[in-house]
Image: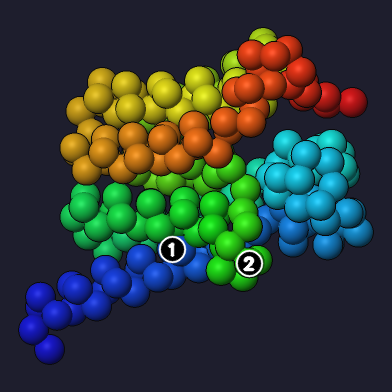
Amino acid sequence: MPADTVFILTAVALLIAAYLAGSLSSAILVSKLFGLPDPRSNGSGNPGATNVLRLGGRQAAALTLLGDMLKGLAPVLVAKHLGLPPLVLAGVALAAFLGHLYPVFFGFRGGKGVATFLGVLLGLSWWVGGGVVLTWLAMAAIARFSSLAALTAAFMAPLYLHWAGAPVEFLIVTVVMTTFLLWRHHGNIRKLLDGTESRISFS
């Protein structure tokens, strides 16, 4: 089989696998494991770690966060291990991210994508991903608003990539994901402006 054909088939297979991995909703699976209410119809209605924290506590939320990050990180690391070019790595990252937002296994109703966004960034660049994670943690600890922490971290991600000299494909896909995050958080932005946004509670 020609090398070009092998490359195309490998890239397509990884894109599909990344989307399917992203479609595994950690919030729903963890909630079922812990016997918690369905996060899609309880709390904020968002199948993400913050809502699981409200519904089931820190342990369930931590597992949800870890699962959502890993499903973004793992596909990108596999693509890196295979020595695929930046364009394919960026595509795999976007596929995993979109899988979380629009999961095929759960009626295309997914979360807001913050943890998976962090996971794919860690896969693309440990330095950049680590910086974004630290930004999120710092803002969450200071402001106690998960949405504000997510938006701040997302806006900083392209700057970190630029400062790190990352490939332009990484920068473009990160801007695309940041745009999706902004759109998915439009309700939270309105609540932040109105002063009605819920704060993170670790108790």
Where residue 144 sits, quadrant-wise, is top right
Residues packed near mark 1 inside 10 Å, few (<14), some (14 to 19) or many (20 plus): many
User: On residue 18, which mark appears?
Assistant: 1
Residue 156, can we see it?
Answer: yes
Whether residue 63 is visible, yes or no, is: no
Q: Which residue is pictured at 60% across the width and 16% down the height?
A: 139
From the image, state whether disc 2 or disc 1 is nearer to you: 2
Q: Disc number at residue 107?
A: 2
Q: Position of residue 188 (x, y in %)?
A: 64, 27
Residue 113 lies in what quarter of the image? Answer: top right
Q: Is residue 186 left or right of residue 192?
A: left
Q: Amino acid at mark 2?
A: Gly
Q: Tell whether 35 sits left or right of 25.
A: right
Q: Along the line of sight, which residue is nearer the eye, 22 or 82?
A: 22
SS of the residue at dot 2?
loop
| Above or below for 198 versus 120 | above
Residue drawn at the location 76% of the way across and 45% of the way down: 45
Q: Residue at x 33, y 34 (%)?
A: 175
User: Compared to 194, does 187 lie above or below?
Assistant: below
Task: From the top left corner, tell me how far across and down residue 145 is, in percent.
Answer: 69, 20
Which of the two discs, 2 and 1, labels the residue nearer the N terminus?
1
Relative to 103, is 201 above or below?
above
Q: Quadrant of the N terminus?
A: bottom left
The number of callouts visible is 2
Please state the horizontal and vertical placement of residue 151, each as a whole percent of the image: 52, 25
Q: Quadrant of the C terminus?
A: top right
Give the spatial CA distance, label 2 vs label 1. 17 Å
Q: Residues within 10 Å of mark 2 (few under 14, many from 20)?
A: few
User: Which amino acid type corresponds to the residue marked 1 in the rendered image?
Assistant: Ala
Pick whichever, 82 or 139, lies toward us. 139
